[in-house]
Image: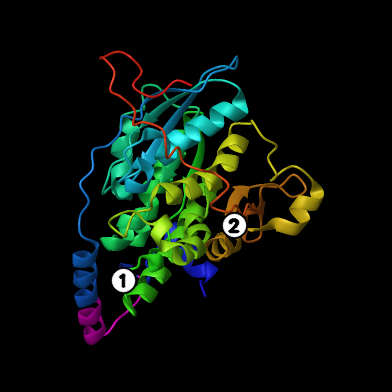
Amino acid sequence: MLRAARARRIATATAFGGGGLTVLGASTVALLYLQARRAHRTIGFTAWDSPRADGLYGSGDGAVISFAMMGDSTAAGFAVTDVLQTPAGMLAEGISAVADGPVRLRNVARVGATSKDLPGQLDRIRRDPPDLAVIFIGANDVIRRVRPADSVLYLQNVVRELVGMGAAVVVGTCPDLGTVQPIAQPLRYVARRASRQLAAAQTIAVVEEGGRTVSLGSLLADDFLTYPDEMFGPDRFHPSARGYAQAASAVLPSACAALGLLPDLAVASEATRDRGVLPVDLAAVEAAETSGTEVNATRIAGRERGPRGRWATLIRRRLGWEAVEPAEHAHAAEPTPEGDSPGPAR
């Protein structure tokens, strides 16, 4: 079980266990190292050419919405070849449908990225700030043993800058690496615990800076374990097109609410607040443990903060993986001449 105090300490970049998550004996470290090498050989490598996602999506009479996708290989849509099977493409199409207007997408996510790479991705969109930024980050931080406080600090600084630019920010927190099939016990337990601790700390930092988070790890875990052949891609590590569709279906309502396209349940009614409001550190821990949970800042009696810090609302949006189908039969996006919008316009 996660502890809110630990997540809070990571999020505020204070020392935690000498910079790590646990103190392990030498024999345990050796066992984990051997299992990690075995898992890496089992997972292998999948060749991939990224589909050209940038461009205009959807149509309608509404104003063009600028949308930036940031983060790691999950944000990039690793291993799928159709742009409409990537999370960014599905989100752009979904937002366009809700807004009844076109969405201009810039996908600056990079395979292998950690939180340390987010400032560089931000530099690529700084001159033309987006209306919405969605960030998927955290898995590589755990895999590469990045100090959790450092990982969260990079994310926090980028969210702060984006909000300062006027962008709405939604962060899909660290996925549950304990669902990855080639990873055996006890490494699977350590990976799950590290993933959830990082996800909780990410939530605290993001909400404190004015963004909102969606718990991807706990949302995807049950379906990934139940439907591994359908939810994992060919490398048995990254999601398949259906897995990405599950992530997109979880994030889409939060993205639309952040843009003001849907009612924001965090402020919709006193009844909602009475049922789902907690101090942000407690909300973060519950979100990391509970499927399909958004965490967003709120107020109680006009106050943002209570004795334990900022108030936050838990919003549970449990969607089955059937709810959003990827464009499995669509053709891959064709490159367009320089200067044209390479993404599909529909």
User: Residue 98: x, y in percent?
Assistant: 61, 29
Q: Residue at x 34, y 28 (%)?
A: 333
Q: Quadrant of residue 142?
A: bottom left
Q: Residue at x 53, y 49 (%)?
A: 213
Asked whether 26 falls inside the magenta stretch, the response is yes
User: Residue 322: x, y in percent?
Assistant: 55, 50
Q: Which residue is mark 2?
A: 280
Which of pointers 2 and 1 lies earlier in the amino acid sequence?
1
Residue 91's tag is: none
SS type, badge 2: helix
Give the number of callouts. 2
The magenta stretch spans which residues? 21-32
Q: In the picture provided, is 140 more to the left or to the right than 259? A: left
Residue found at the very far front of the displayed protein: 329
Depicted 174 relative to depicted 297: above or below: below
Choose between 157 and 239: the one closer to the eye: 239
Choose between 110 and 9: the one closer to the eye: 110
Q: Amino acid at mark 1?
A: Ile
Depicted 135 relative to depicted 308: above or below: above
How is this picture coloured?
Answer: rainbow
Q: Which residue is mark 1?
A: 183
